[in-house]
Amino acid sequence: MYVTTDASTSEIARIAACTRDKCVQVWTFNAGNCKLFPVYSKAYLEERDVVPKALAIDNNANRDLFVFGLYDGGL
């Protein structure tokens, strides 16, 4: 499992995780009330041969998530 975080604000953090079984999940953590909210969840099956190797959250307004592939170097 690979995990990355983005705590660009003091109250809200974005947490992303990926696994070698082709799953990618993103949550938002609110430090004010200590709650975790699901944002995105995707399991790549046969439609794409994506096996996540690493994650990165961009420092833009949308805080885009980049998933780097293990075998094909795909993004």
Image (cartoon, rainbow, N blue to C red):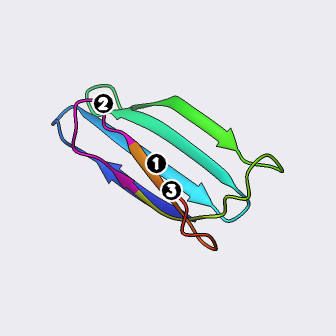
Left or right placement of residue 55 versus residue 30 in this view: right
Tell me if residue 59 is in the magenta stretch.
yes
37 vs 41: above or below: above
Of 56 and 12, which appears nearest the observer? 56
The quadrant holding residue 70 is bottom right
Of callouts 1 and 2, the N-terminal one: 1
Crowding at dot 3, Cα within 10 Å, few <14 / some 14-19 / many 20+, comes out as few
The residue identified by callout 3 is: 75
From mark 1 to mark 2, how far is it between C-alphas?
Answer: 14 Å
State the residue at coordinates (68%, 65%). Answer: 20
13 vs 39: above or below: below
The residue identified by callout 2 is: 62
Secondary element under disc 1, as helix, strand or loop, is strand
Q: Nearer the viewer, mark 3 or mark 2?
A: 3
Left or right placement of residue 7 versus residue 52 in this view: left
For the record, the magenta segment spans 56-64
Q: The N terminus appears in which quarter of the rendering?
A: bottom right
State the residue at coordinates (53%, 30%). Answer: 38
Q: Nearer the viewer, mark 3 or mark 1?
A: 3
Tell me if residue 73 is in the magenta stretch.
no
SS assignment for the magenta stretch, majority: loop
Secondary element under disc 2, as helix, strand or loop, is loop
State the residue at coordinates (74%, 61%). Answer: 21
* Extreme-right residue of the structure: 46
Residue type indicated by callout 2: Asn
